[in-house]
């Protein structure tokens, strides 16, 4: 599952860069190989679980008639995406724990991974979570009492 989630997140790699992607794939500087812990699976499973749980809550617990409009659905999806943005940003290793060869170019002294790369990964997780929310919505909405036709 690490490969599946890793490939899916790498579709949005332009948000967080190659060096952070190498770190999340588990690149080990001393071994010069990908022998470390792959973080994509952990983040992917957390995101998938949160989105599924909150989507089920929307359709089967919080399904009053007055909140069954498309813009309520969109706002709820935005809330889920914001939660997953912070999840993605927090679960990415901090800059202090990333290995030096990925963090800093030793010849030029340029920092390769910045805090904005972590924010970019949070944005990628936001997009992934909204895609999952849309997919789960179309799968489970049919058995809802009041929100069966939300969003369409």
Image: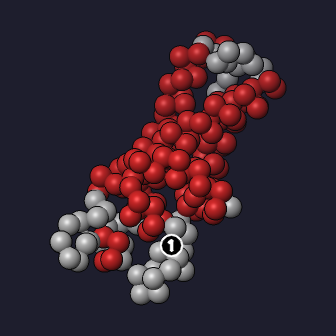
Q: Image quarter for residue 74?
A: top right
State which quadrant residue 108 falls in. bottom left
Q: In this orientation, which residue lies closer to the viewer: 148 or 19?
A: 19
Residue toward you, 43 or 57: 43
Position of 10 with respect to 142 (left or right) is: left
Q: Quick check: can you spot residue 85? A: no
Q: Nearer the viewer, residue 111 or 81?
A: 111
Q: Position of residue 2 (x, y in %)?
A: 63, 63
> Can residue 25 be seen?
yes
- Image spot of residue 112 (x, y percent): 28, 64
Q: Residue at x 80, y 24 (%)?
A: 142
Instruction: State the residue at coordinates (35%, 72%).
Output: 102
Secondary structure type for disc 1: loop
Q: Is 12 placed above or below 113 here?
A: above
Q: Is residue 34 above or below residue 62?
A: below
Q: Residue furthest bottom?
A: 30
Q: Which residue is mark 1?
A: 26
Q: Residue furthest front?
A: 107
Residue 110 in the image: x percent, y percent? Answer: 20, 66
- Location of the C terminus by quadrant is top right
- Left or right of 124 on screen, residue 98: left
Neighbourhood count class around disc 1 (C-alpha, 10 Å): few under 14, some 14–19, many 20 upward: some
Total count of labels: 1
Residue at point 45%, 51% (across, down): 13
Q: Is residue 67 left or right of residue 92?
A: right
Instruction: Please identify the quadrant where the N terminus is shown.
Output: bottom right
């Amino acid at each position: 599952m690490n490969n599946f989630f890793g490939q899916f997140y790498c579709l949005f790699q332009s948000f967080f860069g190659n060096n952070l992607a190498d770190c999340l794939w588990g690149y080990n500087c001393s071994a010069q190989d990908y022998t470390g812990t792959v973080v994509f699976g952990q983040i992917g499973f957390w995101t998938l679980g949160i989105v599924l749980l909150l989507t089920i809550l929307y359709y089967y617990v919080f399904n009053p008639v007055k909140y069954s409009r498309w813009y309520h659905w969109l706002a709820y999806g935005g809330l889920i995406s914001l939660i997953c943005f912070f999840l993605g940003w927090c679960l990415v290793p901090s800059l202090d724990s990333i290995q030096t060869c990925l963090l800093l170019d030793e010849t030029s002294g340029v920092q390769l991974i910045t805090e904005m790369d972590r924010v970019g990964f949070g944005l990628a997780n936001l997009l992934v979570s909204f895609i999952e929310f849309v997919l789960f919505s179309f799968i489970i909405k049919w058995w809802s009492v009041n929100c069966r036709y939300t969003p369409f």
